[in-house]
Image: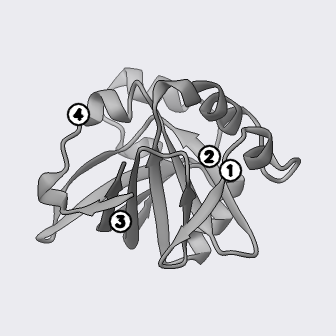
């Protein structure tokens, strides 16, 4: 993979995240977990290039992202759609879903990501905030939340490294 500047990053987050999906990965060389996500974005906060994503506390990845300082967002070519589907449906608590998905973990500066990814954003956690249904402004958002609590936690991470194939 080749490291590029965030200024050279060319992606449409509505397609890359919302339609093609990504894997959120955190942990260390002894233990890591990943999950598929289609919520998130990229932008600028506090004069830093950032990525943001959302994880429910019930997800196994939540434990890892809470504990670790860094996490990765990995993007894949379409041929990995089945792997991303599997990583979104299965829990790493119950199986070795990474192996089952045919993905190969690797570590960039100690941060887990995947050999098969075509784009990797390495992020340092800057901010986390639990979301609340009380802060939702529209009925469709309120309906989406339903009665499942607790709600997602939003994580904002400074993008410290961008790697592309």
As helix, strand or loop, the secondary structure at mark 2 comes to strand
Which image quarter: residue 110?
A: bottom right
Residues at circles 1 and 4 in contact by the CB criterion of under 8 Å = no
Mark earlier in primary sequence (1, 4): 4
Q: Nearer the viewer, residue 66 or 3?
A: 3
Q: Which residue is mark 4?
A: 12
As helix, strand or loop, the secondary structure at mark 4 comes to loop
**Cα gap from disc 1 to disc 4, whole angstroms:** 27 Å
Q: Residues within 10 Å of mark 3 (few under 14, many from 20)?
A: many
Along the horizontal axis of the image, is 4 left or right of 126? left
Along the horizontal axis of the image, is 60 left or right of 118? right
| Residue drawn at the location 61% of the way across and 76% of the way down | 67
Where residue 138 sits: x, y (%)? Answer: 32, 27
Residues at circles 4 and 3 in contact by the CB criterion of under 8 Å = no
> Which is in the foreground here, disc 4 or disc 3?
4
Residue 163 higher or lower than 135, as above or below: below
Mark earlier in primary sequence (2, 4): 4
Residue 40 higher or lower than 77, as above or below: below
**Cα gap from disc 4 to disc 3, whole angstroms:** 18 Å
Which image quarter: residue 19?
A: top left
Residue 35 - label: 2
Q: Which residue is mark 1?
A: 59
**Cα gap from disc 2 to disc 4, whole angstroms:** 21 Å
Along the horizontal axis of the image, is 124 left or right of 47? right
Residue 153 - label: none
**Cα gap from disc 1 to disc 2, whole angstroms:** 8 Å
As helix, strand or loop, the secondary structure at mark 3 comes to strand
**Image quarter hosting the N terminus:** bottom left
Mark earlier in primary sequence (4, 3): 4
> Which is in the foreground here, disc 3 or disc 1?
3
């Amino acid at each position: 993979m080749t490291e590029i500047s965030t200024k050279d990053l060319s992606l449409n987050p509505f397609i890359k995240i919302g339609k093609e999906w990504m894997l959120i990965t955190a942990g260390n060389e002894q233990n890591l977990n990943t999950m598929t996500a289609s919520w998130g974005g990229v932008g600028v906060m506090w004069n830093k290039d950032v990525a943001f994503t959302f994880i429910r506390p019930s997800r196994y990845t939540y434990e890892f992202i809470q504990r670790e300082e860094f996490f990765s967002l990995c993007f894949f070519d379409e041929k990995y759609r089945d792997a991303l589907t599997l990583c979104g449906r299965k829990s790493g608590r119950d199986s070795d879903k990474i192996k089952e998905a045919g993905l190969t973990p690797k570590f960039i500066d100690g941060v887990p990501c995947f050999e098969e990814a075509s784009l990797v954003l390495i992020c340092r956690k800057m901010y986390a905030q639990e979301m609340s249904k009380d802060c939702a402004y529209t009925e469709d958002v309120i309906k989406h939340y339903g009665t499942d609590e607790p709600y997602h936690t939003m994580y904002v991470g400074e993008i410290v490294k961008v790697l592309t194939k």
